[in-house]
């Protein structure tokens, strides 16, 4: 470390690329139906140096707690590097969902179309999402997925607030 009084600061963060999330079991969301699922995402540990004298932080590194597989999201001309994860999407919160190296993400699916929606995978742009803590467990901000139909596409919204299940999280 550089000379002087400094503290090492560790914080949980999401991976640095989008995640292509594949539920362990694909499901169908009927027309005009909604579903709320919970999934777990491995955190990375951000390591910063912070001056005790009140100076800013210097980012040293980010370390994954789990090695994720790389993948490509998009077509040949317009796409991006991402990570691929298979998750057990759950409809209910249970204590076994929580582990110290995982962030629980609540995803609200709303099928606003007149057609059934086959849910096989989703690209989540997590690299700028916030991580919250409540009662020693990590939460990601709520993600809302609104499907409008094959011609009208999908809106994905992240509101920079913890989900209602983690109200009061910091």
Image (cartoon, rainbow, N blue to C red):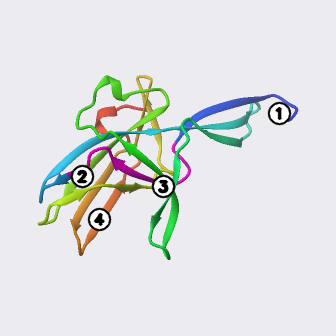
Q: Mark 3 points at which residue?
A: 18
**Residue 56 falls left or right of residue 170:** right
Q: Which mark is residue 109?
A: 2
| Residue at image coords 25%, 59% | 146
Q: Which mark is residue 1?
A: 1
Counting from the top left corner in percent of width and height, residue 73 is at: 45, 63
Q: Earlier in the sequence, mark 4 or mark 2?
A: 2
**Quadrant assignment, res 138:** top left
Counting from the top left corner in percent of width and height, residue 44 is at: 56, 39
Does the residue at mark 1 contact the one at mark 4 (Cβ under 8 Å)?
A: no
Pick the quarter of the image with the N terminus: top right
Q: Name the residue under label 4.
A: 154
| Residue at image coords 45%, 36% | 132
Does the residue at mark 1 contact the one at mark 3 (Cβ under 8 Å)?
A: no
Q: Residues within 10 Å of mark 1 (few under 14, many from 20)?
A: few
Q: Nearer the viewer's eye, disc 1 or disc 2?
A: 2
**Residue 112 falls left or right of residue 38:** left
Q: Residues within 10 Å of mark 3 (few under 14, many from 20)?
A: many
Q: Nearer the viewer's eye, disc 1 or disc 3?
A: 3
């Amino acid at each position: 470390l550089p000379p002087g009084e400094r503290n090492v600061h560790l914080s949980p963060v999401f991976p640095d690329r989008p995640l292509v999330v594949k539920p362990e079991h694909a499901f169908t969301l009927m027309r005009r139906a909604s579903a709320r699922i919970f999934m777990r995402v491995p955190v990375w540990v951000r390591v910063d140096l912070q001056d005790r004298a009140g100076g800013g932080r210097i980012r040293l590194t980010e370390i994954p707690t789990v090695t994720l597989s790389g993948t490509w999201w998009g077509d040949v001309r317009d796409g991006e590097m991402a990570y691929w994860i298979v998750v057990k999407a759950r409809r209910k919160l249970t204590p076994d969902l929580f582990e110290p190296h995982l962030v629980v993400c609540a995803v609200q699916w709303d099928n606003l179309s007149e057609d059934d929606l086959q849910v096989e995978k989703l690209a989540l742009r997590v690299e700028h999402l916030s991580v919250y803590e409540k009662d020693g467990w990590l939460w990601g901000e709520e993600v809302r997925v609104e499907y409008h139909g094959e011609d009208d596409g999908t809106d994905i919204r992240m509101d920079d607030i913890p989900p209602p299940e983690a109200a009061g999280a910091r």
